[in-house]
Amino acid sequence: MEIERKFLVEKSKIPADLEQYPHNSLEQAYIITEPVLRIRRKNDTYILTYKGAGLMQREEVEFPLTKEAYDKLLTKTEGNVITKTRYKIPEANHLTIELDIFSGMFEGLFLAEVEFPDEETANSYNPPEWFGQEVTYTSDFHNSTLSELSPMEAEQLLQSIKQ
């Protein structure tokens, strides 16, 4: 079970020293979005992920893939391929902030996610000052939703968060 909260982040508030934190280049695409069946390249690792329905809490199961299987499944995906760099920033109480800096079609989108061991910890979490609007309880910023947007819809979404 995955329990996480998501927040928008303004570019001007992103920590200046990001390169000191571990980070990965991610590429992901969706075979289906309900339920979510996603493939992901994380540097040189390949993963197939199933995600159930939900917002803050949802089932998640991952399976390893070979590069060949990933490449073949990539031809079976629909919609946008999501590309981003994910930075892992240590947070208090053994938590980690995963800061996603999107590229490509979603350049200008910055999302912070924090995963929690239980719902009580998630509900009592006080985000750092540099976090912006919480978007946990909307699917608008799920990567699976982003994968379905047209270029015009993506541009409208990016413009709406700059206001």
Image: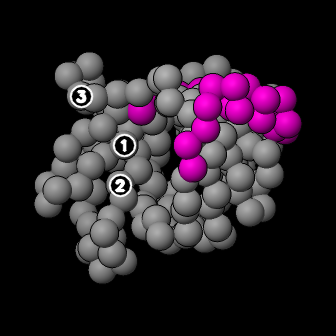
Residue 63: x %, y % from top left: 57, 49
Q: Residues within 10 Å of mark 3 (few under 14, many from 20)?
A: few
User: Magenta span covers which residues?
Assistant: 63-86
Q: Residue at x 49, y 23 (%)?
A: 44
The amino acid type, in three-letter code, at marker 2 is Val
On the rendered structure, is 57 left or right of 141?
A: left
Place residue 52 in its image quadrant. bottom right
Q: Residues within 10 Å of mark 2 (few under 14, many from 20)?
A: many
SS class, disc 1: strand
On the rendered structure, is 79 left or right of 106?
A: right
SS class, disc 3: loop
What label sits on residue 98 in the rendered view? Answer: 1
Residue 126: x %, y % from top left: 24, 63
> Which of 70 and 4 lies nearest the eye of the viewer?
70
Tell me the distance, in whole angstroms, between the alpha carbons under discs 1 and 2: 6 Å
Q: Give the residue pinned by disc 2.
A: 114
Q: Give the residue pinned by disc 3.
A: 21
- Residue 39 highlighted magenta (yes or no): no
Q: Residue at x 27, y 57 (%)?
A: 127
Contact, mark 1 vs mark 2 (Cβ under 8 Å): yes
Tell me the distance, in whole angstroms, between the alpha carbons under discs 1 and 3: 10 Å
Can residue 141 be seen here? The reply is: no
The answer to whether 52 is drawn above or below residue 106 in the figure is below
